[in-house]
């Protein structure tokens, strides 16, 4: 019987595992690095131990240290979470020797599935659908070109030990292969310590759909349906759902059958995920098997009502699966949004720093579920050492439309300050018509935001009306002595005339009837000035807004849905005067290269006085183990280089001045 | 009777037209509002009561005798800002370029007298070409009268100057004597002598903007306390400041009945101070999390950024905040920071605004230029200001409080009423490394020795407990409770009375 679990992980997944362990009456042990000293999971666990410096290879990846603490704390099992040591053969082997249970599959399953080339060979042997490609790692560029031409361009270069998009590159042309191969190899080496890269056919407009399976040590197997994870940026999933709007029963059964066949072959004995790529004709191909708990497991849990962590613990304990395939029902719809500290305006570059404010959405109706898996709270640090994920926000409702609406409403209440984040981008995606229809692929973001996500992408007249209502309400709340019957709401050079028909404001409640272009709006809210999230009812419809800043009695920064505006409210007489106000002068930023994020200067490809063409590489910045290439946006002359290789730079630091 | 009323309306209409449509249009074309438009923007609707609308200048020299405008080149009167009485003068650039005539000066003096009598703030909107040359010495006398009034009113009622156009020559000295100066970006400037004179005398080529624009005065000279995008936004900010300030020196900074505010712990503050003593953090986060609605009115935001000063409310009561900013120059005290904070402390003391001081100061900034420019006397200004202040003084040491700078920053020794420290506080005569170098000069043989001794010193002295054991610190508080502790302290100190020996006035080291 497992009585005490050490969690060899951090952040939200550590918190998640602790919750289930608590439910099962199992004690928990946390290990933490320097950067995680004050993290929430450390406080949540029954015991916690320091394991070393912040860099993962000095703490969370050091098998010896973790085993030492497992022994010291008398833990009888270890849950590895995802990432870190979750799919590490040596770790499982070492645990076996110490007679500590590994909450995950057996080591052979890990070895066979962990190596992409080996797993593909096994899949071929079992007659699973497999993407055409070469099954051996390729080092030599010349040989690579030959293979690629045989498969046909476009091809995909993939790191053998990779995952999460690291070391993955699409190559469209023969000429681009050699350069990309080198880059993929070096990225693979940096990230995984293994530079093997292989080549396969690249499938256009693919969907990423995976099957969740659960197996015990006694040969029992079930699957828990699929998850669709097609919405990805930087090859990493951002929105996942269960079930998939694309999968019918026939497809589900076929995919699940292959998934379970593969699992049986390797005597799989835990929760696992078999990933497939599905084309628009519902052909599916085996991609890989993840022999761990997936990041996006909550959506499956919400739809099947199965606690996957609990099942994993029981399987590791040698218990028989109590679930049969008939017990697994896909009930309703679940969506998960990954809230990241990143800047969607700058190609989703990671953002780090202190979370000044982290305010989670509130549960609203009893029949709806909002689940937020997070490991941070106000005052936490988003550090440079780990994945900049803030939380996984998951919702569950009766059907997809309702789940989407609920997710938008939850995101509208999610207030984050201190780091850049993707909340507005997520709302924008969830509102997208193609997404609503379920018309998605892994290229969704690229094809829907061809020039990148832009600020206030979704601004339209109906959102503007919401802004005007909210600004009017703030004005009347901030200026309680105000007797004016007509207000002007000013957005840049546009002025909207608002008639105040009724205004009753008490300590708790503001009731307001206003008229905007012959349309009446009845607004009610119990918002107080110190609250960041405003809930209001507009003609009996519930709406949410974020009040980012009240600058003075007249000027407010507001976020509605995926848009943010600075609005001014004044008397009509004052509003008229805005016509005379000069345009503000902005500093000319076109003559400098500005660091989009904090990081390390890896390479400077230009010299002072050099003339460069548009699109030419100027600087490589490394942040969070990712190399980011900064290219020139126009033909120009390098006037001055302000940094050198090896410098660490902050976000918005000027790196280079152009002539 | 109806005839008379008609005449009155006609006169009023004339006065409201200022310098006429052509000049008004020119004013607008410069991105500036007229004197009356500014007043209307600043004051509550229909609250303006004008004085001296029919006053005219009295000169006949140089042929301006026939050119007369009702009210001359300034609009004056009283009005309300969010219900609070204020007195205003607004110079009219469309009439004789807003130049100051004898009559103009008299109008200003009149409302200043009124404001003093009733104890209401004065807001002066400056947009003037300077002295009325045609009036000669009479105009200069007018300036002199205004200066004298400024000085008499100083410390009795708040005086705020808003620069919304040119303000040059002698004219700059009236704003200079008021409590706060705000400027409009790109359209206002202040200097004693303009670029042309500068060029003739010193051969320096400089634009108006570089010499005395809003950016120069908010970041270099510290003449101005803030600059905003345009006329309207500047006036909005003035409204906000007026709302925060008491009307006069007899009024107390009282708890205002506000909406529900929360005094619950803010756990995020427990992680504000990083473990590494050399890692900076943003002190502004602490201020905004301690005050109501995160609404902080920062004064001189772009000058001496190693020191933060400004107003905020705690449970509805206006408080003056003074804080070292570890993000800039490690938060140390230098000449600029000392001057900036000293003036702010004295303003708060004049108007019974309690002071809350957040301390993270490694000491005074060393350097030849600091010494040669008089850090001794300039640093003394802050020490002096804190020591003489009799308003409630609450001090919280968040991290470093070293040496003389510890004493300066509203310590117990300068009549601090309530002195708290966070557990992360290090109150010591200097940093551990420096202390060890002096204390063990002859004993340290190698680096390892130094390290051990430094660790020892840190353990023993770099904490709040030695100071607490002497009563210099009243309590070591949890960061999460800072807002509640400050709110309680302010309540307790509401009726504080403290007097200093009789004097004509003090002699602060200027």
Image (spheres, rainbow, N blue to C red):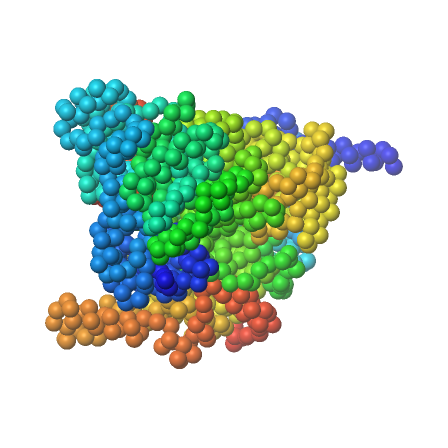
> How many labels sit on residues?
0
Query: Is A629 displayed left or right of B345 in the figure?
Result: left
Q: Give the quadrant of residue A67.
A: bottom left
- In the rendered image, residue A645, in percent from the top left (x then y), is placed at 20, 40
Q: Residue at x 40, y 31 (%)?
A: A254
Q: Residue at x 56, y 56 (%)?
A: B292
Most foreground residue, A635 or A609 = A635
- Residue A149 in view here: yes
Q: Residue at x 75, y 41 (%)?
A: A502
- In the rendered image, residue A591, in percent from the top left (x then y), is placed at 32, 30
Most foreground residue, B298 or B2 = B298
Extreme-bottom residue of the structure:
B470
Q: Give the quadrant of residue A603.
A: top left
- Residue B185 in view here: no
Against A396, residue A465 (above or below) is: above
Against B182, residue A231 (above or below) is: above
């Amino acid at each position: 019987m497992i009585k005490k679990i050490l969690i060899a992980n951090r952040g939200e997944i550590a918190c998640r595992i602790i919750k289930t362990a608590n439910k099962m009456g199992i004690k928990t042990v946390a290990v933490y690095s320097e950067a995680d000293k004050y993290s929430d999971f450390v406080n949540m666990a029954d015991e916690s131990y320091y394991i070393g410096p912040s860099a993962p290879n000095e703490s969370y990846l050091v098998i010896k240290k973790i085993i030492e603490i497992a022994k010291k704390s008398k833990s009888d099992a270890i849950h590895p979470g995802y990432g870190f040591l979750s799919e590490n053969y040596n770790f499982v082997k070492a645990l076996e020797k110490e007679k500590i249970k590994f909450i995950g599959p057996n080591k052979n399953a890990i070895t066979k599935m962990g190596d992409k080339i080996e797993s593909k060979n096994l899949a071929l042997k079992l007659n699973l659908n497999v993407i055409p490609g070469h099954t051996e790692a390729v080092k030599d560029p010349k040989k690579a070109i030959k293979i690629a031409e045989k498969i046909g361009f476009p091809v995909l270069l993939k790191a053998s030990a990779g995952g999460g998009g690291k070391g993955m590159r699409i190559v469209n042309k023969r000429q681009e292969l050699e350069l990309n191969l080198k880059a993929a190899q070096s990225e693979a080496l940096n990230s995984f310590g293994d530079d093997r890269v292989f080549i396969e056919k690249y499938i256009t407009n693919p969907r990423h759909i995976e099957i969740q399976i659960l197996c015990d040590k006694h040969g029992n197997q079930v699957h828990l349906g699929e998850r669709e994870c097609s919405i990805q940026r930087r090859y990493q999933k951002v929105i996942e759902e269960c079930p998939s709007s694309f999968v019918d029963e026939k497809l589900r059964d076929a995919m699940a059958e292959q998934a379970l066949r593969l699992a049986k072959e390797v005597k799989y004995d835990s929760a696992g995920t078999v990933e497939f790529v599905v084309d628009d004709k519902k052909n599916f191909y085996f991609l890989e098997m993840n022999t761990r708990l997936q990041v996006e497991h909550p959506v499956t849990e919400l739809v099947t009502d199965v606690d996957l962590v609990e099942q994993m613990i029981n399987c590791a304990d040698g218990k028989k699966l109590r679930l049969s395939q008939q017990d697994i029902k896909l009930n309703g719809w679940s969506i998960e949004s990954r809230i990241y500290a990143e800047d969607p305006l700058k190609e989703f570059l990671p953002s780090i720093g202190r979370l000044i404010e982290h305010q989670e959405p509130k549960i609203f109706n009893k029949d709806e579920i909002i689940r937020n898996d997070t490991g941070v709270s106000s005052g936490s640090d988003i550090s440079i050492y780990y994945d900049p994920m803030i939380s996984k926000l998951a919702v569950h409702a009766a059907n997809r439309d309702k789940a989407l609406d609920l997710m938008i409403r939850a995101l509208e209440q999610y207030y984050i300050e201190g780091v850049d984040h993707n909340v507005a981008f997520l709302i924008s995606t969830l509102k997208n018509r193609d997404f609503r229809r379920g018309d998605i692929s892994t290229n969704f973001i690229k094809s829907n935001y061809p020039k990148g996500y832009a600020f206030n992408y979704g601004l339209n007249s109906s959102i503007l009306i919401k802004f005007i209502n909210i600004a009017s309400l703030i004005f009347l709340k901030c200026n309680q002595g105000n007797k004016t019957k007509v207000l002007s709401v000013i957005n840049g050079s546009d002025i909207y005339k608002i008639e105040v028909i009724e205004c009753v404001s008490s300590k708790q409640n503001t009731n307001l009837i206003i008229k905007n272009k012959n349309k009446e709006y009845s607004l009610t809210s119990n918002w107080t000035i110190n609250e960041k999230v405003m809930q209001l009812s507009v003609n009996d419809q519930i709406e949410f807004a974020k009040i980012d800043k009240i600058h003075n009695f007249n000027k407010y920064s507001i976020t509605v849905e995926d848009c943010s505006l600075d609005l001014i409210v004044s008397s009509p007489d004052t509003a008229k005067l805005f016509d005379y106000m000069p345009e503000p002068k902005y500093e000319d930023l076109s003559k400098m290269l500005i660091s989009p994020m904090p990081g390390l200067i890896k390479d400077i490809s230009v010299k002072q006085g050099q003339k460069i063409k548009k699109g030419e590489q100027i600087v490589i910045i490394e942040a969070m183990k990712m190399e980011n290439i900064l290219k020139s946006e126009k033909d120009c002359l390098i006037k001055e280089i302000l940094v050198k290789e090896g410098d660490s730079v902050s976000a918005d630091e000027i790196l280079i001045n152009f002539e | 009777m109806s005839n008379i009323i008609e005449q009155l309306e006609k006169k009023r209409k004339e006065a409201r037209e200022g310098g006429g449509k052509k000049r008004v249009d020119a004013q607008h074309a410069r991105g500036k509002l007229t004197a009356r438009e500014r007043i209307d923007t600043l004051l509550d609707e229909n609250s303006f009561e004008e004085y001296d609308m029919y006053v005219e200048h009295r000169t006949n020299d140089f042929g301006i005798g026939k050119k007369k405008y009702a009210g001359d080149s300034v609009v004056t009167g009283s009005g309300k800002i969010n219900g609070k009485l204020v007195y205003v003068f607004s110079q009219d650039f469309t009439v004789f370029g807003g130049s100051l005539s004898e009559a103009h000066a008299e109008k200003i003096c009149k409302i200043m007298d009124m404001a003093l009598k009733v104890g209401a703030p004065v807001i002066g909107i400056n947009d003037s070409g300077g002295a009325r040359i045609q009036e000669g010495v009479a105009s200069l006398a007018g300036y002199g009268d205004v200066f004298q009034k400024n000085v008499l009113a100083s410390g009795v009622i708040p005086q705020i100057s808003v620069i919304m156009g040119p303000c040059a020559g002698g004219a700059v000295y009236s704003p200079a004597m008021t409590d706060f100066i705000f400027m409009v970006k790109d359209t206002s400037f202040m200097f004693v002598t303009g670029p042309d004179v500068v060029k003739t005398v010193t051969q320096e080529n400089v634009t108006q903007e570089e010499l005395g624009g809003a950016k120069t005065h908010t970041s270099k000279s510290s003449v101005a306390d803030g600059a905003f995008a345009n006329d309207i936004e500047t006036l909005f900010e003035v409204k906000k400041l007026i709302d925060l300030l008491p009307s006069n020196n007899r009024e107390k900074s009282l708890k205002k009945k506000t909406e529900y505010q929360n005094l619950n712990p803010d756990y995020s503050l427990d992680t504000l101070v990083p473990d590494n003593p050399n890692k900076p953090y943003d002190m502004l986060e602490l201020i905004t999390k301690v005050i109501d609605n995160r609404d902080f009115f920062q004064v001189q935001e772009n000058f001496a950024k190693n020191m933060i000063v400004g107003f905020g409310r705690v449970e509805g009561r206006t408080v003056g905040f003074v804080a070292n900013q570890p993000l800039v120059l490690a938060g140390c005290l230098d000449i600029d920071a000392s001057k900036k904070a000293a003036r702010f402390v004295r303003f708060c003391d004049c108007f019974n605004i309690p002071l809350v001081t957040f301390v993270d100061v490694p000491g005074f900034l060393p350097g030849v230029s600091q010494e040669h420019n008089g850090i001794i006397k300039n640093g003394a200004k802050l020490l002096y200001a804190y020591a003489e202040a009799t308003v409630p003084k609450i001090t919280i040491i968040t991290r470093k409080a070293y040496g003389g700078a510890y004493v300066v920053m509203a310590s117990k020794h300068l009549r601090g009423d309530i002195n708290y420290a966070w557990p992360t506080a290090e109150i010591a005569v200097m940093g551990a490394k420096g202390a060890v170098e002096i204390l063990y000069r002859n004993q340290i043989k190698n680096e390892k020795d130094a390290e051990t001794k430094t660790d020892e010193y840190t353990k023993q002295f770099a904490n709040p407990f030695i100071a607490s054991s002497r009563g210099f610190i009243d309590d070591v508080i949890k960061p999460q409770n800072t807002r509640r502790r400050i709110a309680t302290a302010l309540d307790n100190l509401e009726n504080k009375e403290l007097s200093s020996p009789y004097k004509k006035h003090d002699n602060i080291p200027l």
